[in-house]
Image (cartoon, helix red, strand yellow):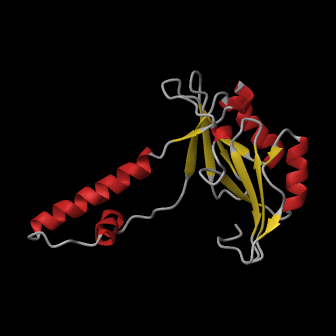
Amino acid sequence: MTGKHRTAAVSFACASCLMVATTLGTLAMSRQSKNKPQPSARVERSAVQGARVRFEHLGLNVADPIKTAQWYVDHLGMKVLREGAAPVNNRFVGDAGGNMMLELYHNAAAAVPDYAALDPQQLHVAFFVDDVEAVRSKLLAAGATAVDQVTTTPAGDKLAMLRDPWGLAIQFVHRANPMLSAK
C-alpha cells in the first residue's frame, strides 16, 4: 500500500475510556448502595449536569496533515482555523458554517492506519451538501475515488460514499428532512 492510500487514525480511546469509566462508576455506586444496580444514564447525567456539551472536532492522525488539509480546503471549501508547527503540523479545518472541525495531525508515536483497507461502514466522515451528484463529480475529478454510486434511502436522503486521495472514507449526504440545524 502506498503512502497515497494511507490516511487518518481516529482515536476511539476517549469513547472507550468513557464507557469504562461509566461502567466502573455504576459498579462503584452499586457497591455503595448494597449491590443495587444503578442505571448508567444516571451516572452519565450527573457527570455533565450543568455543563454544555457539543461536538467540536474529530482528530485524524495522517501522514501529511498539511497536504491533506489543503485538499479539503481546495475541494470542499473548508477553512484552516488553526495551524501547529512541525513535527505534528496539526491543522484544524472547519466547515463553512462553523459547525464542526477535523483536526489533521501527524503523531509519529502512533501508527497511521491504512484506512483504505477498512470498510466505510467501520469509519467515515460525513458532510452535508446541497447537491450530492455535483460534489461527487467534482471530487472524483480532484483525486477522490468512488466507493459506490449515489443512492436514495427510503427516507428520501441522497448519499454518496467516496474516499479522499489518502483512502479515508468520506460520505456526502443531502437529507430530505434535515436532522441538524442548517447553520
**Residue drawn at (65%, 48%) of the image:** 119
99 to 89, vertically: above or below: below
Location of residue 27 by image quarter: bottom left
Quadrant of the image for the C terminus? Answer: bottom right
118 and 95: which one is in front? 118
Total tally of numbered discs in the picture? 0
**Residue drawn at (33%, 71%) of the image:** 41
**View extreme (top): residue:** 87
Residue 160, x across and y down, in percent: 79, 58
Residue 74, x across and y down, in percent: 82, 41
Location of residue 178 by image quarter: bottom right
165 to 32, vertically: above or below: above
Give the side of residue 128 with respect to residue 101, left or right. Answer: right
**Residue drawn at (71%, 39%) of the image:** 167
123 to 6, vertically: above or below: below
Residue 8, x across and y down, in percent: 62, 37
**View extreme (left): residue:** 34
Residue 1, x across and y down, in percent: 70, 27
Give the side of residue 21 with respect to residue 52, left or right. Answer: left
Location of residue 83 by image quarter: top right
